[in-house]
Image (spheres, coloured by chain):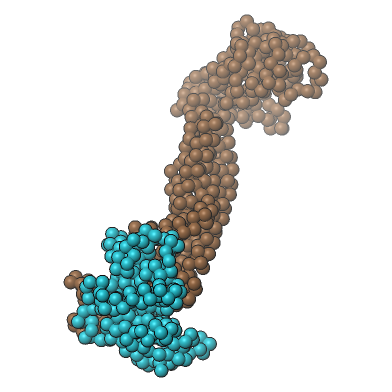
Chain colours: A cyan, B brown
Amino acid sequence: MNTFGAVVTTVDDAEGHPVIELDDVSKSYPGGVAALRSVDMVVDYGELLAIVGPSGSGKSTMLNLIGTLDRPSTGTVRIDGYDVASLSDRQLSALRSRRVGFVFQHFHLAAGRDALGNVADGLLYSGASKRDREQRAEAALVRVGLSERLTHRPYQLSGGERQRVALARAVAGDPPLLLADEPTGNLDSVSGAGVMRLLHELHEAGTTILVITHDREIADSLPRQVRMRDGQVV
Amino acid sequence: MSSPTALPNSSDLVEEHRRRIPPGHRERAEDTLRSARLRLSDLIRLGGYGLRSRPLRAVLSALGIAIGIAAMISVVGISASSHADLDRKLAKLGTNMLTVSPGRTMFGKQATLPDESVAMIKRIGPVQSATATGVVGTVHAYRNDRIPVAQTGGLSVVAAKLDLLTTVGAQLDQGVWLNGATDRYPAVVLGATAAERLGYGPTVYIGGRSWVVVGVLRKVALASELDTSVIMGWPAATTYLAFDGHPTTVYTRSADSQVEAVRGVLAATANPSAPNEVDVSRPSDVLTLRRATNAAFTSLLLGLGSVALLVGGIGVANTMVISVLERRSEIGLRRSLGATKGQIRTQFVAESLLLSMIGGAAGALLGYLVTGTYATTQKWPTVVPWWILAGGVGATVLIGAIAGLYPAIRAARLAPTEALAAT
């Protein structure tokens, strides 16, 4: 069932370029640790895929590069058509605020803010007014099925509900690309299944979703898998 | 996705994107890569969230600033209130009184004023009144005849003309002033301190006889030497105590506009043969001078207040450094949500500014209350100069900015991946 209404992705987006394009990307850290070794990957708009691998395989580095939180040592990363290497910190930040949503294993919710505040603050850097942010936050929370929990603080919510708040925060700005880092890693299987169902619904609404996981079962439930080992795609 | 209002921007990077991105995407490119500014209201709210998440710590570090500001404002406020009180007093007492007293001769001996000096001074045009007292140097006043001679109590015996009271602006606390009858007989009026030391008895013992106390003066602001005097009539002093009749202090009042002119001729008029042996002074100047001494003391206290403020500022900086360390994952999250380095920096500076300004406002209020309470107990008008309030607010803004800058720069420098890894 599609509960998300409007289709987000436009024909323009789909035609011009892939949403993610990694071209011979390597990343090494000071001390000579090579986290990624000449990785090539292309993800088109509207895909739902998993990057799967054991810990230390380089999948977190992949997430950081794709999320423009980090820059590659060599090679080219293009997100939504933009070459990450050519953009300044301000431009990358703007790109993240409008085109990329993040969901983390540890939720990263502000303890002192209720669900609505947490989601609305996610739009702080988009330039929207407070009223606009709150309206969109409420809509996003309704989407993830938390319309009854708007004024609950994180400590009043279950783990699954917290991750759904984080999911609402990630999609409140309608980004074409959603990156989920072990989104079910801290959840029991029932809550985890609920979060995965939400991701599927978002995908049906047109969002490109990339799930990073070490869990083969979750990876196999998605249409495409990119398997990683020792910093390389296998 | 594209906005119909493409904002004109001719920066090089945008130009480069114009070239690289197909025509249909141009407007979108400019919009997507333009990071939105944080509104001021959002920034203030953002700083507030940070403080509210650790209220006790915020209160304690704001307290440091508050104490510093309160100390500075109350020090300056109390001194300003005391000045205002002095000004009010001076306005009431008048600043047109000059006193003339004998100085020293060229050979260092105590000089004397000629007996006719009062009469001569009275003849100066702008002088409205002139009167004199003469210290009877050979005797001292005692409570009764049982007191050892050495216990003089620091009091002096003084002969006075009858118009002394009006000229120096003295007022009676008890009894009456000397008159044409009592100034010939053994009768005295006591200065306020002298009455205290002599025990408010009905008589005092001077030069081998008892003298009747007919009155007690209040403290005399412009002639405080009268407070420790036992005052008798000029004829009585001459008759009973072998007083030499030389005046030792001549008090004059002149027209306000002519005080300086009178001052110029006073020495020569009082002792035409030896004007250099005459000291002329203006008692209200002495009060003003004491005010200047107070100002030196005030600046010392002000220095102490600013040290307190500095310590408060260090407290705020400390709080902010710890806050940045603890909130690494929040910083990482904000970066992932699209906050630029500058916005992270601004957020932490705003938080620090808010913290110190809350402290500053509380301190200003506290300082005002302290000044008001103290001034009220001293029966002074409450005066807090605007410049110290403005200076206090300015100081807190400066301290907040400086204390917050370093932690904020550290927060902004944090790599987003590193910040997110800290859970």
Query: Which image quarter: residue A3?
Result: bottom left
Q: Position of residue B119 (x, y in %)?
A: 57, 16
Please report the residue visible at 33 percent of the width from the left and 74 percent of the height from the top. Answer: A198
Q: If the image is split into quadrants, where does the N terminus of chain B sit?
A: bottom left
Identified at 27% across, 83% down, the residue is A45
Q: Is residue B126 left or right of residue B146?
A: left
Q: How many marks?
A: 0
Q: Give the percent coordinates (x, y) of residue B198.
A: 71, 18
- Residue B420, image x, y percentages: 45, 74
Who is closer to the viewer here, A80 or B396? Answer: A80
The residue depicted at 41 percent of the width and 84 percent of the height is A217
Mark yes or no: residue B252 visible. Answer: yes
- Please provide percent x and percent y for residue B387: 44, 45
| Residue B245 quadrant | top right
Q: What residue do we see at 40% from left, 72% from top?
A: A191
In front: B133, or A186?
Answer: A186
Q: Is residue A1 above or below residue A114?
A: below
Instruction: State the image quarter where residue B157 is shown.
Output: top right
In the rendered structure, the answer to whether residue B234 lies left or right of residue B269 reads: right
Q: Nearer the viewer, residue A11 or B373?
A: A11
Judge whether B236 appears above or below B51 on screen: above
- In this rendering, the answer to whether B391 lies above or below A129 is above
